[in-house]
Amino acid sequence: MATVRPFAGIRPNPAYAEQIAALPYDVMNRQEAKEMAKNQPYSFLHIDRAEIDLPDDVDAYSDIVYQTAKQKLEEMKQNGNFIQDTVPNFYIYRLTMGEHCQTGLVACTSIDEYTNGIIKKHELTRAEKEADRIRHVDTLNANTGPIFLAYRKNDIAKERLAHWTASIPPVYDFVAEDGIRHTVWCVDDSETIRCLTESFAQVPYLYIADGHHRNASAVKVGQKRRAEHPNAPADAEFNYYLSVLFPADELHIFDYNRVVKDLHGYTKADFLSALEKDFIVSLAPQTPFAPQNIHTFGMYLDGTWYCLQAKPHICSNDIVNGLDVAILQNALLTPLLGIQDPRTDKRIDFVGGIRGLEALEQRVDSKEMTVAFSMYPTSMQELMAVADANLTMPPKSTWFEPKLRSGLFIHDLG
């Protein structure tokens, strides 16, 4: 069963919350982060991506980057941009995007429950990306980016969260530059904290929705501290890490689309002909084309949208191989376009559905890419089924929106 634990959060002084809150470090590259933080001296990107404040020729993984991040955090604490609560609390974090609303509990979760499978993953991680966040957490002595977790229905928790948000004023409430509203409450009532803790003790599993690398890194830092301090108590802060837990039925997964640089030696006519072995190929009923059902794909090639309907023989009831992202990979990207490992192949790129299908057209029309594929979104049910089977999904299977902002909550490791 899942453990949630309150913590004495380091969080923005309310006067600076909107200026501090920033998109997660891993949804942009270095230059994009630098541009986002331009003329924004309090942006959390100065801590999450401290290389933006160093010369461009400084390696993003050099020691000075992590030391610069630590210095910036300490400076902002000393200047009063950040405050720290004096007692452990829970926090409630609500994100509103148009008509969509999701409300999560901000808490610490257990490194042991990650290693023993109570907190379930569905993606593989890359060692170099883990190493970056391990050094970041270790140097700053803090979890600075929350892990995005999901859980199945919990009526008691839902009722308590709803009561608190309806009766207590928020500590932060602002609309970010992308139109997403971020609202935060501090839960400082001992009875409510006890009830929420007990309600999650009835939840059998938590699921990583987003943040696999941050999760793995936070756990490894905790294990490192445990080895360094063998006599520390079981409730030492480093045995827990920062998370936001959302009910699965409130989450929305967008399509995660693909663009490929070339046709791997095929002419357009030959490629369309080769597709007919495994797909029913037709002109798309509308443009741009977003698939409305599973096992259906959009393809943009040479200014034209096509509909690709997977033939029955390439569909599967297997939990992983039956996913649309796996069907496209196994029946098209690998055998026809030569994309053996989409995690490392430089010929393929991925475009989150929040950017719109016009982003696919732009990448192809500009000749940067040759062909694009639009996907039907993976569902939360599919994600949890893969995780429950202790399996992993193909890379870039899910794109969650809205994104959690970093900088609103920091967990001090003590």
Image (tube, rainbow, N blue to C red):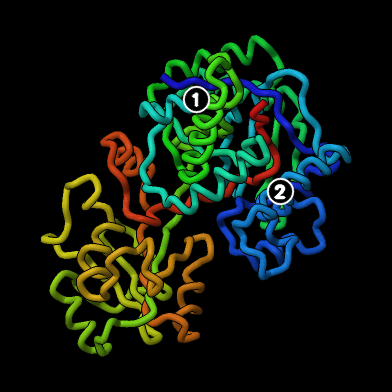
| Dot in front, 1 or 2 | 2
Left/right of residue 113 with respect to residue 166 in the rendered view: left
| Residue under pointer 2 | 67
Classify 192 as above or below 106: above
Q: Earlier in the sequence, mark 1 or mark 2?
A: 2
* Residue 332 seen in the current view: yes
Question: Could you give the CA–CA distance between mark 1 and mark 2, rounded to whole angstroms?
Answer: 27 Å
Classify 194 as above or below 45: above
Classify 299 as above or below 78: below
Q: Which mark is residue 110?
A: 1
- Few, some or many residues within 10 Å of mark 2 (<14, 14–19, 20+): some
Q: Which mark is residue 291?
A: none
Tell me which residue sits at (27%, 63%) in the image: 329
- Quadrant location, the C terminus: top right
Quadrant in which residue 262 is drawn:
bottom left
Q: How many marks?
A: 2
Q: Position of residue 254 (x, y in %)?
A: 45, 54
